[in-house]
Amino acid sequence: MPESGEDVSVRTKEEIAPSGETLVHEAPRIRLMTDQAVDEAEQFAPGASEQSVAMPIEDGKVVFELQSLSCYYGSFRAVKEISLRVPHNQITAVIGPSGCGKSTLLRSFNRMNDLIDGARITGQILYHGVDLYADGVDPVEVRRRIGMVFQKPNPFPKSIYDNVAFGPRVAGFRGRMGELVEESLRRAALWDEVKDKLKSPGTELSGGQQQRLCIARAIAVEPDVILMDEPCSSLDPIATLKIEELMHELKQNYTIVIVTHNMQQAARASDLTAFLTMGPDRAGYLVEMAPTQKLFTSPDNRLTEDYITGRFG
Amino acid sequence: MESATHAEGPQYSVRRTFEEALDATKDDVLRLGAMVEHALERAGRALVDRDVELADQVRWDDAQVNELQRSINTGITALIATQGPVARDVRELLALYHAATELERMGDYAVNIAKLAQQLAAEPEIPILRQIPQMEQLCREQLRAAMRALVDVSEEEARAVCARDDEIDHLYNSVYEDTMSLMSVAPDKVRQATHLLFAAHHLERLGDRVTNIGEDVVYLATGRIEDLNP
């Protein structure tokens, strides 16, 4: 090898593998790290398993990029070294056995874990290339852009109208509130069912309607991403299918990440599926992430196959 | 409460994703049927006209038939794996899967006939038995009728297709008799007669595959598996 070649490789190493935490705040360096990490991610096996693969995204925008993300509650590591990418305007499902860190992972996407004592992360979550956990990033703004819908529908004890208007009011929305409420309810496929009773309490709706109200509430602040944590686990099959069809509509405008232990739901409703499981240390790690059709017809990893066919987990 | 609201919102159809995928699959199977019908028509014409180039085309185009069949079957596998279809949905997917497989095989018969056309064109010319173009035409009619029955999910149409297969069998038996006679009176034409017999045999097999699609339609419509071409 000529000397110049060595020079190049030495220089690159210095730039892309900085040892000091201080570099995190230097934007150009971060970008270099990211590019390198993207390349490595194509072959990089996160977690303990040798066969695990991070999802390569051939085209389109990347909304989230996780780089070796670990989540801790105190000294317990709940999620271990997950590297993956979430593409724009797609539905990404996260599946895995109970306690494998799915919800923890999801909550890290909008810094919801910040609210829990002793929770911290290592590694990085880049949101449109920006480090979500960097100093100066406002968690409130993060949660406005990255909304969340929870397992149990949790409408406020207010009218249907006020449930939807609440977020925009808090955010200082000055436009026509009535139109915004209608538009949000329409997008959540709830408008026709509630347009004549907007003043009724949101809590009087059926479970499925309440969940769609929560989705309308999340949409009203015009987020970019909607995170869903088991959004159908308390709903009957028809209401569940409605939410799934709604997700399908919503992905035109939003990026959706859904955590579910209902494998059939992930299979039916998502474009990409990430399968997490936990190691002997009880830390969840990523086994495999692939287009949903691929993962459910011919997964690469034996652990995935065993889980989705019900042989384990 | 949920089901009542569901009935109220006609613009909001549950399982639209699945319906769309199912419709697209059906369209693909119909397209596959049309491709096979076209191949068969050209193979028959190549046989009668001693058109080697046309026969070549049929052989080349078969790759597209194979490719479409693979894509249909892969798509159906993915739908079954991801959508968890039950009852009529799963029967429909299985019927389409099987129909695609049968159509691909029919495409192979068309190729076989095209190859025979080329072999015959290399031999001294003999008159093509009139039953062979008749069989070929009847096969295409049957194929079209079976595809229509599949689209309409019509048990009645499917049964009619299966019943009519006897006509093809009858023509085949008649070709068999004629080629046997030809061979015994003109031993120098044994090669040509054998080619003709094989062509008729491929058409007869093709007709049976059409009835298999008819049986699929009956299964789809009723849930019962019946042998309609005993």
Image: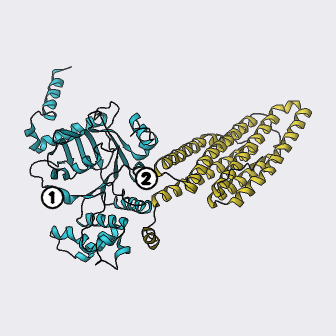
Chain colours: A cyan, B yellow
> Label 1: how many residues lie within 10 Å, few (<14), some (14-19) or many (20+)?
few
Let me know if marks 2 and 1 both belong to one chain: yes
Mark 2 vs 1, N-terminal side: 1
User: What amino acid is found at the position of numbered circle 2 in the picture?
Assistant: Arg
In x, y percent, where is residue A203? 30, 70
Calculate the distance from the C-alpha at mark 2 to the C-alpha at mark 1. 33 Å
Q: Going 73% across and 37% down the picture, which residue do you hit? A: B116
In x, y percent, where is residue A241? 42, 60
Q: Going 44% across and 69% down the picture, which residue do you hit? A: B6
Using the image as rendered, state which of residue B120 and residue B14 is in the foreground.
Answer: B14
Res A248 → quadrant:
bottom left
In x, y percent, where is residue B66? 58, 42
In the picture, the quarter occupied by the N terminus of chain B is bottom left
> Label 2: how many residues lie within 10 Å, few (<14), some (14-19) or many (20+)?
many
Instruction: Look at the picture and state if A33 lies above or below A135.
Output: above
What residue is disc 2 on?
A: A268
In x, y percent, where is residue A155? 27, 66
Disc 2: host chain = A
Using the image as rendered, state which of residue A47 and residue A90 is in the foreground.
Answer: A47
Classify residue A8 as left or right of residue B109: left
Label 2 residue SS: helix
What residue is disc 1 on?
A: A140
Label 1 residue SS: helix
User: What amino acid is found at the position of numbered circle 1 in the picture?
Assistant: Val
Res B47 seen here: no
Q: Going 48% across and 46% down the picture, which residue do you hit? A: B81
Disc 1: host chain = A
Instruction: Look at the picture and state if A255 lies above or below B124.
Output: below
Classify residue A22 as left or right of residue A198: left
Using the image as rendered, state which of residue B201 and residue A239 is in the foreground.
Answer: A239
